[in-house]
Image: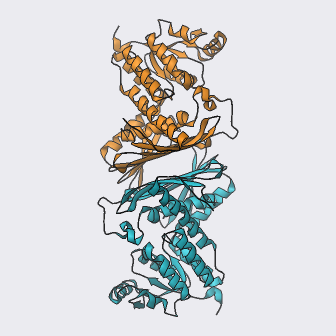
Chain colours: A orange, B cyan
């Protein structure tokens, strides 16, 4: 069988809510198949399999990994479990698409990436927006020089709970919850995506609940006096924007994490005189594109090192931000 | 003569560039007259008076202040000179509209306000945007509760020099230049305007040229975990926006400092589902409105304490930010 056309057969590790979206995306991507879903109980796995029309349901994650018919797994488990199950999946020869944040810290992320590379499987985190066609269009604008030299990124990603759902996994320290890993991770990725280099130093401040961040605000210093800042939190209206400002213009995207519409995605270029032009990218479902990009790497037989590298860098910056927020100190981010 | 209709007779202290705009505004405001302009040399004053059709020109600031026919002065001198010339003007019974930043520090600003109050003259800083009709419309939105509880302000105000004009007064430490007083002052005012209370603590970081800020980025902590952040600088494209985010919506203004158009001024309300509504305020020239508000206070015979109070608070917050940027420490802002 032609390797480039090989069907990629997926298993889903847990019945988390986000799995529904990714399950649909796997179905919509070309040359894929969903084979099996695993949960901690057979009963829950079967209920989910029935709801999502998945042929097989198993009552343990390991059982799914032991299934030789599966090529790749999607791991939407809580962040605290990403390390163990990514390594175990790699050990069974499964390619791994793992939800964000990739790991509890950069040491874990680095080990996960090393294990995957050694065992010849692809690793990617579940950050969808980087796969959207709009993201490529924005990159083209940044590269074109139309903004001049890039000076600053400002970003915000938040949503609001009127009442704090204390049982939500986002608020469980033992599951590695918190606004930084859940929301800030996207802002950090946007900043890394823009500048393509590590910050020299970072400062962050957070408000905690249950020892995890309810919100966090951050400043990041880059070479040549360039700066970035962002905020994330569970206590402010749903916002998901960034502004990238250069010496001669700025690019604004008001829904970079996930477009308000699947039919079209927009961004704006602003010039120095207040004129702005809207750039529209039609019909792209970013999670489908993510699955396709993942499967392309799997089928090609050549692992794409960029994806785990991006996830490791994002995690490393988040580590420094978390340390700063805890300590109240500016943290050097050394290479 | 009816006090409410009394013509307010203006003198302008210096031939700074911004004076042209304010001169025009004084002319467009009802019940005002420009009587005289002063410069350090008679020659320069006369040239400016001729260009701007001002009847009298004098070769010293004091001479203008000694003119008994003048009711009010506009002071667009460099910030380092605001203290001396505001006090001197008050001593001659002149009402004072003084360019921002009002003073080198809050101690000066407080003394200036006290002197003006004692001598029965109005003091106001030259922050124009707060006088725009749009600002009242935005206030109404904030007060209506449509955004829920206010959680965060993010602001940016910058413009770009491709080559650093080392002789520009904005870069002269002896004239109290720098991006914080020149641009950040507006962002601080917007934050104060939104929350109406002092931050508990602030943190700032700056890049310096000639010992004044080329740019500055700041974080401000408020009661109940509310936050604000802003950036200002001479090294990034012309931007002048803020976003005010509440628990259930946000308000975005992309030209709060001065609307891109005199014909209409806009802001947007964003809800939690990505819908936004544009709110348009027609024809308002904010500097004319500023002069009118100033003259109303002068004519009423009742000094409006709010204007000097706003300027003092803005300066106090700027002081803390400057200290933080210099020291690298988080600064408590005590009452």
The x, y position of residue B32, in whole percent, is 53, 85
Q: Answer with the quarter of the image where residue A335 lies.
A: top left
Residue B94 visible: no
Residue A51 seen in the figure = yes
**Viewer-side residue, A230 vs A57:** A230
Q: Residue at x 60, y 22 (%)?
A: A16
Q: Residue at x 44, y 82 (%)?
A: B13
Give whichever of B84, B136 is nearer the camera. Answer: B84
Q: Position of residue B134 (x, y in %)?
A: 57, 63
Q: Is residue B305 left or right of residue B286?
A: right
B322 lies above or below A331: below
Count the labels in the image: 0
Q: Specify whether A304 is left or right of B256.
A: left
B171 over B331 or under it: above or below: below
Q: Residue furthest right?
A: A163
- Classify B198 as above or below A82: below
Where is residue A283? Give x, y as percent. 46, 33
Q: Residue furthest left?
A: B163
Q: Considering depth in this image, is A295 or B180 the residue closer to the camera?
A: B180
Residue A95 location (% of width, % of height): 43, 16
Please tell me in which quadrant of the rendered image residue A7 appears.
top left
Quarter of the figure with the N terminus of chain A: top left
């Amino acid at each position: 069988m032609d390797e480039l056309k090989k069907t990629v057969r997926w298993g889903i590790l847990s019945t988390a809510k986000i799995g529904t979206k990714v399950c649909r995306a796997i179905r919509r991507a070309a040359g894929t198949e969903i084979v099996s879903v695993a949960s901690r109980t057979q009963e829950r796995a079967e209920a989910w399999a029935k709801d999502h029309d998945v042929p097989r349901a198993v009552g343990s994650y390991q059982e799914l990994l032991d299934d030789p018919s599966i090529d790749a797994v999607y791991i939407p488990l809580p962040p605290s479990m990403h390390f163990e199950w990514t390594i175990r999946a790699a050990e069974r020869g499964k390619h791994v698409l793992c939800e964000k944040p990739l790991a509890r810290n950069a040491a874990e992320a680095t080990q996960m990436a090393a294990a995957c590379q050694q065992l010849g499987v692809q690793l990617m985190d579940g950050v969808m927006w980087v796969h959207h066609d709009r993201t490529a269009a924005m990159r083209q604008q940044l590269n074109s020089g139309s903004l001049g030299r890039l000076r600053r990124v400002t970003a915000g990603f938040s949503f609001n709970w009127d009442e704090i759902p204390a049982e939500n996994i986002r608020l469980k320290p033992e599951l590695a919850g918190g606004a930084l890993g859940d929301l800030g991770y996207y802002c950090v990725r946007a900043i890394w995506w823009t500048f393509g280099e590590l910050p020299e130093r970072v400062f962050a401040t957070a408000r905690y609940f249950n020892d995890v961040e309810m919100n966090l605000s951050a400043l990041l210093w880059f070479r040549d006096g360039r700066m970035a800042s962002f905020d994330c939190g569970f206590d402010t209206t749903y916002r998901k924007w960034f502004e990238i400002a250069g010496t001669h213009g700025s690019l604004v995207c008001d829904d970079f994490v996930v477009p308000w519409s699947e039919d079209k995605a927009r961004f704006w270029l602003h010039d120095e005189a207040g004129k702005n032009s809207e750039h529209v990218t039609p019909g792209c479902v970013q999670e489908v594109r993510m699955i396709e990009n993942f499967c392309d790497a799997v089928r090609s037989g050549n692992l794409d090192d960029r994806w785990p590298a991006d996830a490791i860098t994002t995690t490393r910056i988040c580590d420094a931000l978390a340390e700063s927020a805890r300590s109240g100190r500016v943290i050097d981010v050394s290479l």
